[in-house]
Image (cartoon, helix red, strand yellow):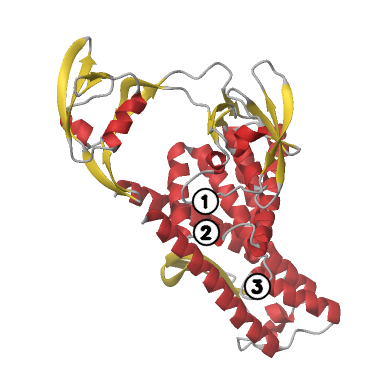
Amino acid sequence: MLAFLWSLGAFIVALGILVAVHEWGHFYVARKCGVQVERFSIGFGKPIWRKVSKSGTEYVIAMIPLGGYVRMLDGRIDDVPPELEDKAFNNKPVLQRMAVIAAGPGVNFIFAFFALWLMYLVGLDTVKPVVKSIETDSIAAIAGVQPGDEIIKVGDRSTPDWEAVNLEIVSNIGSENASVTVKNSSNVEKELTFTLKSWNFDPDSESPLSSLGLTPYRPDATLTVGFVGEGSAAQQAGLKPGDELKALNGTKLTSWERLVDVIVESPGERISLDILRDGQPLTLDATIARRDTPQGQSGYLGVSPTFEPWPEGYVFTHQYGIIEAIGKALDKTWRLMTLSVEMIGKLITGDVSVKNLSGPISIAQGAGTSAGYGLAYFLSFLALISVNLGIINLLPLPMLDGGHLMFFIVEWITGKPVPEAVQEWGYRIGGVLLFMIMGIAIFNDIARIT
C-alpha cells in the first residue's frame, strides 16, 4: 500500500509539473500575441483552488489531475464584445495562432533540456556497460560478444552506460542488423554485427538486453543478509541485517542463488536456517510466504543480500560543470526526441507492437521508482515523459496540438480557413483514434500487473 501511495504521489507531482509546463507555453505566447486568456487550469473537473488575476485570467487547480487546458477568448465559441474583438484568438493572424499552439510542445522540449541540464549538474551515478554473461545460442552469442566485454557503441552512437545501450538497442527494433562495438579487458576494440531478423522482444516479460542474451555485470551476492522486509517471513523468523547464512535445512549453502531457488519453489513450506550472528551460530525456523505470479504461486522470504564491491572504475558519475552540462543536455534531449519519433513511425509500420504502449499506470510506477532513486533519476524521468508529451501532441490528429497546426498550415497556404464542417469531422475522427490509443495503453497497463 505504501508503494502504491508513493507511486501515486510521484505521478501526481510529475504530471502536475509537465501539464503546467505545457499549458504555460500556450498561455505565455497567447499573452504575448495579445490574446485574452480566460482560464489557466491544471486538472479537470471541480476546482479545488482558484484565483482571478487583475488581467481577468482565472487560475485553477482542479480535482482530476490528468491534464489541463488554457481557455482563450474565441469568437467561434464566445460572444465577443466589440472592444475585445482584437483580443480573440480566432481574429489573430494565422502565424500567431500557429505560434500559440506550437508553444505547448515547444516548451515541453525546453523543459526536458532544463531537467537534463539540472540532472547533469546534480550528478547521476551510473555503471559502465560491461557484460557479465551471454546466453548460449542467443543473438549476442552468435555475434561474438564475450563475458567481460564493454559495449562502447551501438551504431555510431557512444554508449557510456547501460541506459544509453538500452536506448540505442531499442532504436534498432525492426532493423535487420545492428552494429555493436565492444572493448575487451585488454582494451582491444572490435565491431560486431547483431542479426536481428529473428529478434522477438516482449516488453512484458523481458528487457531489451535479456532478449538479446546479454546479462549486465553486477557484483555477486554474498551470503550475508543486507535487508529484511517489514512484516516479511524473514522478519518473523528473526533474521536481521548482518546475519551470515550458513546452511538451509541442514545443507551447506554455497551461493545466494541456491537459497533463492529453494525459496521460490517452496511456497508455504517450513525451513530451517543455520546462521552466524556476531560470531555466534544460531538456527532459525521460517515459513515461506506465498505470492501469485503469471507462472503460478512462488515462495517469498522477504530478504535481500549484500554484494561484493564493484571493481574499480565500473561505477562513475555523470556530473559536469554549468557550460559542459548544456552540451550534454542538448544531445540527450535531441536523442530522446528522435528516438520518440522513430518509435511512433515503427508503431505505425508494425515494427513495434502496440503491446509497447504504456498508460498512466506504467507512468505512475515509473515516477515512483525514479523518485525513490533520487532527484537525478526523477529529473531524467521528467525529461523523458516531457519529450514524449511534446512529440505526441504534435501528431497531426485533431484534438491534439498537431491537428490544430495542420488546419492552420492549410489556412496559411491557401489563404482561407478549413471549413467548419471538415474541422468538425476531423475532431470526431481524431477523438475516436485518441481514445482507442488511450484504451490500448490502459489495457496494456492492466495486463502487466495482473
Position above or below: 149 against 195: above
- Marks 2 and 3, how far apart in space? 21 Å
Does any portion of residue 167 appear in the rendered image? yes
Residue 361 screen position, x and y as percent: 43, 57
For the residues carrying marks 1 and 3, which lies nearer the camera in this image? 1
Residue 303 shown left or right of residue 315 in the figure: left
User: Is 79 left, or right, of 417 in this rendering?
Assistant: left
Name the residue rendered at 58%, 35% in the picture.
162
Number of numbered labels in the structure image: 3
Between 193 and 96, the residue placed more toward the observer is 193
Residue denoted by label 2: 355
Q: Name the residue under label 3.
A: 397
Amino acid type indicated by mark 3: Leu
Which amino acid, mark 1? Asp
Instruction: Report which residue position mark 1 lands on.
Output: 202
Residue 304 screen position, x and y as percent: 33, 29
Of label 2 and label 1, which has the lower sequence position? Answer: 1
Query: Which amino acid does the dot numbered 2 rest on?
Result: Lys
User: Where is 312 relative to 434, above or below?
Assistant: above
Q: Closer to the camera, 93 or 440?
A: 440
Q: Which of 94 and 270 is in front in this view?
A: 270
Q: Where is residue 132 in the image (x, y as percent from the top left)?
A: 53, 26
At 62% from the left and 47% from the top, the residue drawn is 170
| Rendered view: 177 above or below 361 | above
Q: Residue 118, can we see it?
A: no
* Mark closest to the chain's N terminus, 1 or 3: 1
Left or right, residue 48 beside residue 40: left
